[in-house]
Amino acid sequence: GTPTGVASSQIGEKVGWDGNFEQTLSKLKANGIDNAAAIGIKNLNDMEAEKNQLLKCGTAQADAGCSVTIRYVAQVSRNNSLGQVFAQMVTGLALANNPQSRVVATNLVQGEDGLNSMQNFSLHMQMLKFLRPLYPRAKVTLHAGELAPGLVPPDGLTFHIRESVMVARAERIGHGVDIMHETEPFELLKEMARRNVMVEICLSSNDLILGISGPRHPLATYLEYGVPVALATDDEGVSRSEISMEFLKAAEAQGLGYLQLKTMARNSLQYAFVAGQSLWSDGRKFVAVAQCARDIEETKLTSNTCRQFLTGNEKARLQWQLEQDFKAFEREWQ
């Protein structure tokens, strides 16, 4: 969401962009950019209060949706002017850096093939490179490579994923469809695998928007090179899709088997921007941490060490629940 879009955009438009990172940031701060994050937190709290009221959360008639934990990724509109983009990045990273905000990361949205996006892409990545050390808790996931031949000139397909990974140091990449058109794609794939950069695979969206499906989709290549992947819906309202359909598509159109689908489901939590340590000491082979090694073998919470570990680590708690769900599902189908 863009809880502060208007406030930060207005300040960014006023300050503009003079080509100097430090100077522009100082001017933004002098013009009250820090208040935009506070406005963002208030807006999110207000929206959640309204949602809780509509769903009757905390009452006997509470909707099932009340039990869903919501986290946010702050959006930056990449086709805006440079001043607005930089200001939105500052606010998005500030929100994601604040443990009280429920915002966990920042992402650049809008069409990657837009004029401003194509012309300014490398500069956007440099902006993120400059800002990220100032907001060390903030994570970044970037839509990159949501492009296909014919949508942009050939050289436009060669650098978006590479710069998102190497310059902006994104922890996750959304789409990554044009990977084989990138400069030195095999080296890039190996680097993504080495850094554990997860790719959010959106099969329905890539088919609908880009016309890329079946063997033309790079999912098999990512798997072959050991790049971690997970399934995502993209915008459910646009693609008219939900996650069950994505798993069906992965099985039918991509020929994936149960173990690959299970790994993708595990990856979606392993690489989620959730607080706390992972249940896995090895997130590739899914070897449990020492505290829970015995418990995970029986999928039964018996030891105090594991109980304590799960209490202190939200990510591990979610992963433990997923393993319980797998066990129940597999028992039913065996």
Image (cartoon, rainbow, N blue to C red):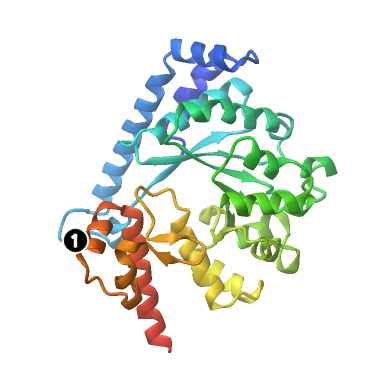
Q: Nearer the viewer, residue 41 or 313?
A: 313
Q: From the viewer's perspective, is 241 left or right of 310?
A: right
Q: Please state which of residues 228 and 90 is positioned toward the viewer in this rendering.
A: 228
**Going by the image, does 299 lie left or right of 158?**
left
Q: Secondary structure at mark 1?
A: loop
Residue reaching furthest to the front: 290
Most distant residue in the bottom direction: 334
Which residue is at a point 37% across and 78% down the rendered structure image?
327
The number of callouts visible is 1
* Rendered position, 114 above or below 58: above
The image shows residue 197, relative to residue 207, as above or below, that is above
Circle 1 residues within 10 Å: few <14, some 14–19, many ≥20: few
- At which x and y percent is residue 68? 32, 56
Q: Residue at x 19, y 64 (%)?
A: 304
Left or right, 10 with respect to 161, comes to left
Location of mark 1 (residue): 61
Residue 236 lies, with reference to residue 334, above or below; the image says: above
User: Where residue 119 sits in the image (x, y, percent)?
Assistant: 74, 30
Amino acid type for the residue under numbered disc 1: Gln
Please state which of residues 169 and 206 is positioned toward the viewer in this rendering: 169
Q: Is residue 103 above or below residue 149?
A: above
Q: Quadrant of the C terminus?
A: bottom left
Q: Residue furthest left?
A: 60
The residue that appears at 26% across and 52% down in the rendered structure is 312
| Residue located 61% across and 16% down the image | 17
Give the percent coordinates (x, y) of residue 330: 41, 82
Quarter where residue 122 is shown: top right
Q: Position of residue 248 (x, y in %)?
A: 56, 73
